[in-house]
Image: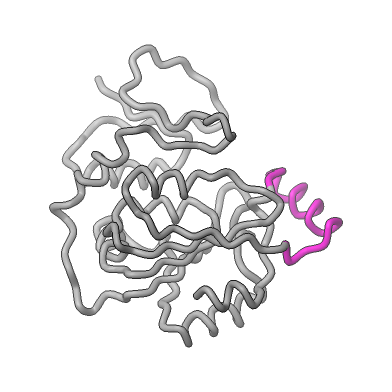
Amino acid sequence: TNYIVVSDKVDYTREFFRLLGIGSKVVSIRNRGIYIEEAIARYRYPNKDKSYVEHKELNAISHLFDKFKKKYSNYPEKIFIERKSSSNGSMKRRIEPTEITHEIAKEKGYQIVYLEDIKLLEKINLFFNAKKIVGVHGAGLGNIIFCNKACEVIEARNSLGMPNIFIELAKEIGIENYQIIEMKSYLNVKESNQLKQMTGNNSNNVLPLMLDKEFIKRL
């Protein structure tokens, strides 16, 4: 029996492979360690600059979904990625004040999208039809594997330092117009440490960001 082993997001992974006609069993190893003797592809590996590059097959994998991609005139050209929930506390990964951020984004023609509410097939075409995508550093940006190569992507992230996962992913699949905006935390040091303790996640990527003029200008 062939197994697909993932750390989490079992339902999403199952949907991902079902769409491709692959019926292997999906197994979660969250908070567990196992040894795999014959792995077809590994999740990621560190570069010398401590960035992370998804495995080299990503460009080929992105093309597996080409047959599902269609141009739709009613799909938004600009999307702003948001999230409702998270298993690791990263639902705090947003731009504050949120209501004002959304209002400005909508005025500039963006549609706010919560990817948890969208099925994979629709998600593929949402990203494929988009000309400009904005999102805070997070798993939602992994969906740029479905984008057309001319798409412009803006990643907002904490100025305290973040891994270069998604810009490396963009390079791997041929998206040239990928921009990073580094922003200050919306919380002071004490509040930031309290949030990290509450979520059990000691990373800067769970901290909410502070809306600033540079971000608004780049939208």
Q: Is residue 14 above or below residue 144?
A: above
Residue 177 or 95: which is nearer the viewer?
A: 177
Q: How is the image coloured?
A: one colour
Q: Is 43 above or below relative to 87? A: above
Q: Is residue 55 left or right of residue 149?
A: right
Most distant residue in the front direction = 176
- The residue most toward the top is 37
Nearer the observer, 201 or 72: 72
Residue 90 in the image: x percent, y percent? 60, 53
The residue at 16%/55% (across/down) is 68
Badge count: 0
Q: Which image quarter: residue 94?
A: bottom right
User: Between residues 13 and 60, which one lies in front from this camera angle?
Assistant: 60
Q: Residue 156: x and y, percent?
A: 56, 62
Magenta region: which residues?
Answer: 185-203
Q: Residue furthest left?
A: 67
Q: Is residue 62 magenta?
A: no
Q: Position of residue 26 (x, y in %)?
A: 34, 33
Whether the magenta-drawn stretch holds residue 190 is answered as yes
